[in-house]
Structures are given as structure tokens and as C-alpha cells.
């Protein structure tokens, strides 16, 4: 099992969601957050009211737990639907997951998601 974290532009979140849904991937979490990165453009940045100590930008973090055999397909879909061709299109991180526990049913592993 793998955990995919994708940091994408706000305006591309709906496109990413729709492409993943069309491909049959149902379970994902979207988090509205702020971050800093190497592509930061001081001329176009908006100073954060939440984190005034940094020049940050708004970003969506998408998280998905998936079977490892689906990693390549999910990464390809995210890259295709999130890409604008400009700096700051985002990052995709794939990490191993040792175990998952479903609180309500006590199921474990891939069946719990």
C-alpha cells in the first residue's frame, strides 16, 4: 500500500479530482494549505495573513491511500491534470504505508480503505 501526497495549484484541484474519479479512484482528501517553494515570485506573491512571517502561496494537498499496483496510473493522472507548464505546478510524493486500521470496523490493510 502507498500514500500519495500531491501539492497542486488551487485552480487545478477540480480537474485532478474529476480525472481521478473518471478513472475509478474514489477515496481522497483535499487540504487547503500554504507553503513556500523555490519557484516563489515576490512580485506575484500575496503575503499570508495566517502566516505573516513568510511569503507563502496557497496550495491544495491531495492525499490518497492506494494499492501499489495503481501508483503509476494515479501519478500519471495527477501530473496530466495538474500541469500548467509553469513553475509551481506542484509535487507528488509517494511513500510506503506499513498498516492501515479502520476505526469503526477494526479492518486492516487495503480492505479497510
Image (spheres, rainbow, N blue to C red):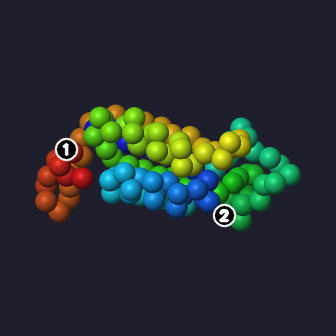
Q: Residues within 10 Å of mark 1 (few under 14, many from 20)?
A: some
Residue 70 at x, y = what percent?
33, 39
Q: Nearer the viewer, residue 31 or 75?
A: 75
Instruction: Name the disc covering residue 47, or none.
Output: none
The quadrant the N terminus occupies is top left
Is label 1 in a helix, a strand or a loop? helix
Q: Residues within 10 Å of mark 2 (few under 14, many from 20)?
A: few
Give whichever of discs 2 and 1 has the lower sequence position: 2
User: Can residue 28 be seen?
Assistant: no
Image position of 102 (left or right of 96): left
Q: Is residue 81 above or below residue 18?
A: above
Q: Quadrant of residue 21?
A: bottom left
Q: Nearer the viewer, residue 63 or 56?
A: 63
Instruction: Name the disc covering residue 50, or none.
Output: 2
| Residue at screen point 28% across, 40% down | 67
| Residue at screen point 61% across, 53% down | 9
| Residue at screen point 64% across, 50% down | 35
Residue 28 at x, y = what percent?
38, 56
Amino acid at each position: 500500500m502507498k500514500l500519495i501526497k500531491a501539492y497542486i495549484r488551487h485552480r487545478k484541484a477540480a480537474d485532478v479530482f474529476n480525472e481521478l474519479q473518471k478513472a475509478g479512484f474514489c477515496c481522497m482528501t483535499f487540504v487547503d494549505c500554504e507553503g513556500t517553494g523555490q519557484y516563489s515570485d515576490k512580485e506575484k506573491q500575496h503575503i499570508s495573513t495566517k502566516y505573516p512571517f513568510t511569503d507563502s502561496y496557497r496550495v491544495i494537498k491531495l492525499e490518497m491511500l492506494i494499492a501499489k499496483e495503481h501508483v503509476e496510473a494515479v501519478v500519471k493522472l495527477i501530473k496530466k491534470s495538474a500541469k500548467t507548464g509553469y513553475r509551481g505546478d506542484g509535487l507528488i510524493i509517494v511513500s510506503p504505508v506499513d498498516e492501515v486500521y479502520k476505526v469503526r470496523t477494526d479492518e486492516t490493510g487495503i480492505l479497510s480503505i
